[in-house]
């Protein structure tokens, strides 16, 4: 049984990843200078600015011949004006940050490789002892970061934040921030080389300069305990020279002020109760201002309090059974075909989900930007979030495991104070093999250690009984460690026809809640034909009509997230005049128009909501 609220994880030390970067902190509450906007760019398909003609890295400590023939895109300023320099950021074109490069330039549409970004800025620190951090919301897939000609470090993984401390490295005027971003796919990467989504490259999320006092609140966690007492446990982690000091925790809306003292490691733990607090729930997503103060540092965020747990096949939110009326979502704005990057786009997508009648969304297949969970907190939408352990990755490769674990750690570190998030998902549609199961069980154990309060899941697969193709079995040793049993199924699209749905018999031998993580069919918005014609809106609507009663036959069914809210770009989907590079399983087309199936699901969810109200 799991419970929780808001977040937890008192094991702050295990969040350290051993990389050169400084630990993540609450960027949205700390930003002093946005570095969003136009950045100069140089497209570098042969990585000429990164390696010389012997393939030695210019920024490697042990290079032997670096500086020989080859580029040098960093901030190299020739001492000798006659020196050959074959690049010029000043005369190069620019792109928007945050933003993927593919949707900003036709010639970069399919580009997978290196692109160099440069941004210049001035900066005046608030005080002499203030600390500064450069924070990147995300860069797909690897980023090498240089400030004023010095390398700050590198980050691998396309969807999670990273930051570098730059205290003492900034100039009052003319700072030059250069980032090499490379989005090549790698067999040992996470994800690997094959995905059903667009491999958007670039600085796809906000870039911000953060500032703190010398000692600052590096992290915090608050957790509502299950039960009627509304008891909260929490902790604050300080970083800096004066760790052992008083910490104040305030919830002004509830007239709560709690005093705690951090120990020599900067950790302060505390407990308090919340008499009269309204709990966070989809119907009333009540958020309270939380103010943390330690010495000169003050951090303020909006937080909600709720518990989530399972009991047998029930999912309980604040102790009450819940049915998850969901939809899956990619981090993409279909109206312009590109990564969604802003709070407004999060509101657009989650607003469409709410119009559908959803109280729940699956953010597939990688960590979405931070706005998604913050907007979901405000709108009252429960979330499943996941890491891109997708289809086929190198289960036996320790570096691949370390990469997946690091992405998950960064995600949990960023988001564990979001009430909307109830499920951490480990993987999507992975094969039942000993190495894979060991990999995912280890990842699940790591997740529990970081956050023992939320539910753990994975989108598993369904198999037909070899003796009877209409008997569908969900059996996976991974389900031993997940709190919910989730699986994708495509009866009627990849397997048979929608009319088969009436014949299906389910075997799901677990006394755990079942969430169907995907089902669906492609339909080109505006293409009308008989319900038997693939790619027509009628076919898709019929598949939904037949699938919903079939799924309701699963006694433990407690939710679903059909595939998918909007059509999305995918290089795998080439069918001319139908797909044209888009996966058409959206309930909403690329122009924002709703397809027939949208209304079928909307009606079903209206019934489910009425049933829940009647309980
Ligand atoms: C799946 C995958 C999803 C695909 C979808 C499809 O099972 O999890 O990423 O986009 O099927 O459309 O085939």
Image (cartoon, helix red, strand yellow):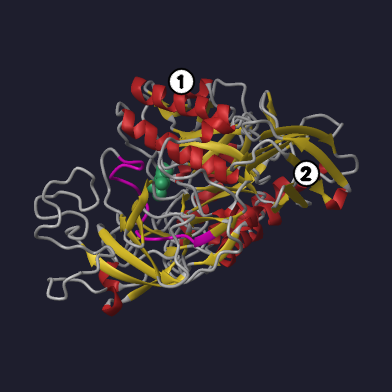
Residue 511 lies, in percent from the top left, at: 62, 21
Residue 192 lies, in percent from the top left, at: 31, 42
**Is-magenta flag for residue 207?**
yes
Look at the numbered disc 2 and give the secondary structure of its residue. strand
Position of residue 198 in the picture relative to residue 74 (left or right): right
Q: Which residues are magenta?
A: 189-209
Q: Nearer the viewer, mark 1 or mark 2?
A: 2
Quadrant in the rendering for residue 145? bottom left
Q: Nearer the viewer, residue 559 or 39?
A: 39
- Looking at the magenta stretch, what is its main secondary structure? loop
C-alpha gap between disc 1 and disc 2? 45 Å
User: Pointer 1 and pointer 2: residues touching (CB < 8 Å)?
Assistant: no
Q: Earlier in the sequence, mark 1 or mark 2?
A: 2
Figure quadrant of the C terminus: top right
Residue at 34% in and 64% down: 578
Look at the numbered disc 1 and give the secondary structure of its residue. helix
Residue at 9% in and 55% down: 53
Residue 486 appears in the picture as rendered: no
In the picture of the structure, the residue carrying the numbered disc 2 is 248
72 is higher (above) or lower (below) than 431: below
Q: Which mark is residue 352?
A: none
In the picture of the structure, the residue carrying the numbered disc 1 is 477
53 is higher (above) or lower (below) than 274: below
């Amino acid at each position: 049984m799991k419970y929780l609220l808001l977040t937890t994880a008192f094991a702050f030390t295990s969040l350290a990843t051993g990389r050169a970067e400084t630990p993540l902190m609450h960027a949205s509450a700390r930003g002093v200078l946005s570095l969003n906007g136009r950045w100069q760019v140089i497209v570098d398909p042969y990585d000429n600015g990164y390696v010389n003609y012997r393939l030695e890295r210019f920024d490697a400590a042990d290079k032997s011949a670096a500086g020989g023939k080859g580029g040098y895109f960093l901030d190299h300023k020739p001492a000798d004006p006659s020196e050959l320099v074959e690049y010029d950021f000043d005369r190069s074109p620019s792109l928007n940050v945050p933003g993927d490069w593919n949707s900003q330039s036709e010639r970069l549409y399919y580009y997978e490789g290196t692109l160099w970004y440069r941004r210049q800025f001035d900066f005046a620190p608030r005080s002499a002892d203030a600390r500064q951090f450069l924070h990147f919301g995300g860069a797909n897939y690897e980023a090498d970061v240089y400030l004023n000609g010095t390398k700050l470090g590198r980050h691998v993984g396309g969807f999670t934040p990273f930051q570098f401390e730059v205290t003492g490295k900034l100039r009052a005027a003319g700072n030059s921030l250069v980032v090499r971003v490379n989005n090549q796919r790698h067999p040992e990467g996470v994800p690997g080389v094959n995905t059903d989504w667009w491999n958007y490259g670039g600085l796809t999320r906000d870039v911000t300069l953060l500032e703190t006092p010398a000692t600052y609140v590096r992290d915090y966690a608050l957790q509502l305990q299950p039960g009627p007492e509304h008891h909260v446990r929490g902790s604050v982690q300080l970083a800096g020279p004066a760790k052992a000091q008083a910490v104040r925790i305030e919830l002004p809306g509830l007239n709560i002020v709690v005093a705690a003292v951090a120990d020599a490691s900067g950790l302060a733990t505390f407990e308090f109760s919340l008499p009269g607090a309204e709990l966070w729930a989809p119907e009333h997503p009540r958020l309270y201002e939380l103010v943390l103060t330690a010495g000169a540092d003050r951090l303020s965020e909006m937080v909600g309090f709720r518990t989530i747990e399972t009991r047998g096949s029930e999912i309980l939110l604040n102790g009450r059974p819940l049915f998850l009326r969901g939809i899956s979502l990619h981090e993409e704005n279909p109206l312009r075909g590109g990564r969604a990057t802003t709070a407004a786009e999060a509101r657009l997508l989650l607003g469409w989900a709410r119009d559908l009648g959803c109280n729940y969304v699956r953010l597939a297949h990688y960590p979405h930007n931070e706005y998604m969970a913050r907007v979901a907190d405000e709108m009252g939408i429960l979330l499943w979030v996941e890491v891109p352990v997708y289809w086929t990755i190198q289960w036996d490769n320790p570096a691949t495991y370390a990469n997946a674990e690091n992405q998950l750690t960064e995600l949990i570190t960023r988001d564990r104070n979001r009430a909307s998030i109830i499920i951490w998902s480990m993987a999507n549609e992975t094969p039942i093999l000993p190495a894979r199961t060991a990999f995912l069980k280890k990842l699940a154990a790591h997740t529990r250690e970081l956050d023992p309060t939320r539910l753990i899941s994975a989108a598993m697969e369904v198999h037909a009984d070899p003796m009877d193709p209409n008997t569908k079995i969900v059996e996976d040793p991974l389900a031993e460690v997940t709190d919910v049993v989730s699986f994708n199924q495509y009866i009627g699209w990849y397997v048979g026809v929608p009319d088969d749905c009436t014949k299906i018999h389910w075997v799901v031998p677990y006394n755990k809640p079942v969430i169907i993580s995907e089902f669906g069919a492609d339909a080109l918005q505006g293409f009308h034909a008989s319900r038997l014609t693939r790619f027509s809106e009628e076919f898709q609507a019929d598949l939904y009509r037949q699938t919903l009663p079939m799924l309701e036959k699963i006694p433990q069914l407690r939710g679903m997230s059909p595939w998918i809210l909007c059509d999305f770009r995918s290089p795998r989907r080439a069918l001319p005049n139908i797909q044209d590079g888009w996966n058409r399983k959206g309930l909403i087309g690329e122009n924002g128009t709703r397809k027939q199936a949208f209304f079928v699901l909307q009606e079903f969810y209206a019934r489910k909501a009425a049933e829940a109200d009647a309980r």
